[in-house]
Amino acid sequence: EVQLVQSGAEVKKPGESLRISCKGSGYSFTSYWIGWVRQMPGKGLEWMGIVWPDDSDTRYSPSFEGQVTISADKSISTAYLQWSSLKASDTAMYYCARHGGSYGDGDYHMDVWGKGTTVTVSS
Amino acid sequence: SYDLTQPPSVSVSPGQTVSISCSGDGLGRKYVSWYHVKPGQAPILVIYQNKRRPSGIPERFSGSNSGNTATLTISGTQAMDEADYYCQAWVSSTFVVFGGGTKLTVL
């Protein structure tokens, strides 16, 4: 079964660092982009960025460039999303998802999703 | 930046047909995907490449894309279809963008 398993919920204080994970299984992890999506409470989906696990090439949405770091460790089929200094405004649900599709044709649909990781940042 | 515009909400009676629009400059030249999101659940892909359905998605879901507007249509809408729906496209400058989402209410 193709799946992405995300790490568990986190409760942090402002200024703390955090790394959450997304482990893929059931497919060739190095053959698909992995993306991260934020959903703040009561708000819509926001695409944050992606990583190509084979060589860790990353691309960021302008809204998230410099705010988070996306990475991957292909040896353990895991992608990461990390913050160096959390803010209360980082409180949200974070999803990882596999970008399927024909990239050369501009098709980057997200066909497999993790269940999400809730991040709560509060003093 | 590139924006995808969706109506905030639409409503439909059970068994009827409903369409949700997604507008963007030159959108018809891009591949559009659609997702539904229910409270407390991860998004589910319902349409990709404008009109293709993933396995397991009912035939009542269909999509089209032309000009500046992509459309998701649900025929014979069921109560279980009540959810938030998001369109998504790839844009070279910002890579991937989502629409603001449409809340579908089945009355």
Image (spheres, rainbow, N blue to C red):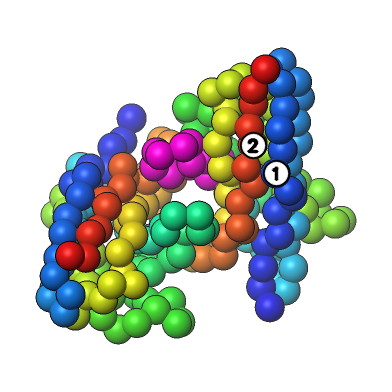
Q: Could you tell me residue A102's position as x and y percent?
A: 48, 64
Q: Position of residue B28 (x, y in %)?
A: 21, 56
> Given the image, what chain letter belongs to the residue carrying mark 1?
A
Tell me residue A90's x, y (percent): 58, 27
* Residue range corresponding to the magenta coloring: A36-50
Who comes first in sequence, dot 2 or dot 1?
1
Image disc number at residue A119: 2
**Residue under the point 31% across and 42% down:** B100
- Return the x and y of residue B88 as percentages of the image width and height: 36, 52
The magenta stretch spans residue A39:
yes
Say which residue appears at 44% left-offset and 55% top-offset: B39
Q: Are marks 2 and 1 on the same chain?
A: yes
The residue shown at (75%, 31%) is A18
Query: Of helix, strand and loop, which mostly describes the magenta segment?
Result: strand
Residue B33 on the magenta span: no
**SS for callout 2:** strand
| Mark 2–mark 1 CB contact (< 8 Å) | yes
Report the side of A25 relative to A32 (left or right): right
- What residue occupies the far right of the structure in this picture? A75
Q: Give the residue type at disc 2.
A: Val
Q: Is residue B5 visible?
A: yes
Helix or strand or loop: what does disc 1 sit on?
Answer: loop
- Can you say which quadrant of the picture contains the N terminus of chain A? bottom right
The residue that mark 1 highlights is A9
Residue B71 at least partly seen: no
Q: Residue at x 39, y 38 (%)?
A: A43
The C terminus of chain A: image quadrant: top right
Q: Crowding near pointer 1: few (<14 within 10 Å), some, many (20+)?
A: few
Q: Quarter of the image holding residue B38?
A: bottom left
